[in-house]
Amino acid sequence: MNFWKHRETEKRSTMSTLTVPPMLHSPRDDARKLHKAFKGLGCDTSKVIQILAHRDSVQRDLIQQEYETTFSESLSKRLASELRGHTKKALKLWLYDPATRDAVIARKALTTTPVFDNQAITEIICSRTPSQLRRLKEVYLSTYHSYIEHDIENQTSGDHKKLLLAYLSTPRYEGPELDNTIVQQDATQLYKSGEKRIGTDEKMFIKIFSERSSTHLAAVDSAYRAQHGNTLEKALKKETSGSFLRGLLTILRCATNPAMYFAKILHKSMKGMGTDDSRLIRVIVTRTEIDMQHIKAAYYSKYGKPLTHAVRSDTSGSYKDFLLHLLGTDY
């Protein structure tokens, strides 16, 4: 078992910024150390962060199982009672496996009152791969006993709703191959459905954006520019608006350069007065084990400073420490 976990650690994606100690402690030892950190007057938050911020999804799940078995209580509930504010929100979200985490974010976005979180639900759905969305739908149903499609139907409207539902339900190829003939046809069709005509054929935009693979859409973006001397993104901004535009842009940007898409979101979350902590937490926690190395590189390329510097200046205390542990060393 220890050898297996060591091999899994060796195979961890180089796009992840998660650092796991070379000599791993057992889940039981980690559970006991966490319990000790909770005891006494006040929580030893730094100890909690030191453990949980350096364990991958499988290890975190095993720790939670051991904690509940040994101490007859949920680690998540204990964290909620011991921690406060943004630190609590970030660490609780980190405990989940990726699919459950996305389901939790989506559910909160769709049930927040009085206004649902349009930004969050669009980001979660339109930036995920077909396999990630399939798993999200499964977990959402088993956890909340409700179809995510049903909740989207009730909370969203218009072309935005149609796009989200189509993107969720349409099977898409995830491989690198593409048919250049169809690419050229799609670029032409999008032009005819938008810039070339009076009014916009939103159905065609939804069809192409929900049915084509990321590799294909990236090629369509290049073909559109070559054919019409204008970027597809500019065409979208000219022809669509509001939540529908946001969804289309998310799909397109994640097809062409997902790291830059998330780098820009992180920058916006910390730009100006105040910090959009919900968005900052959501992106860092959900992307740490996927592509955060690429996001950090994109951030540095775009803004001329490391992402860690921005996080350090916009956050504080244990909240800052946890995020920086996930982000790792400066790019």
Image (cartoon, grey):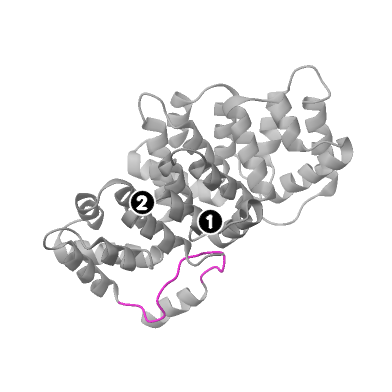
Residue at image position (24%, 54%) is: 79
The residue wearing badge 1 is: 307
Q: Which residue is the site of mark 2?
A: 90
Residue under the point 59% across and 38% down: 167
Label 2 vs 1, first from the N-terminus: 2
> Residue 310's x, y, as percent?
50, 53
Three-letter amino acid code of the residue under disc 2: Ala
Quarter holding the C terminus?
A: bottom right
> Looking at the picture, how far across and down is residue 109, in whole percent?
41, 35
The answer to which image quadrant residue 165 occupies is top right
Say if 213 sits above or below 19 in the image.
Answer: above
Q: Secondary structure at mark 1?
A: helix
* Residue 226 rendering spot, x and y as whole percentages: 87, 42
In this rendering, the count of numbered labels is 2
Confirm whether the magenta stretch covers residue 24: yes
Q: Measuring 81% from the left and 44% from the top, which residue is drawn there?
A: 183
- Main SS of the magenta part reads loop
Crowding around mark 1 (Cα neighbors within 10 Å: few <14, some 14 to 19, many 20+) is many
Q: Nearer the viewer, residue 111 or 150?
A: 111
Query: Which contiguous range is marked in magenta?
Result: 12-25
Residue 129 visible: no
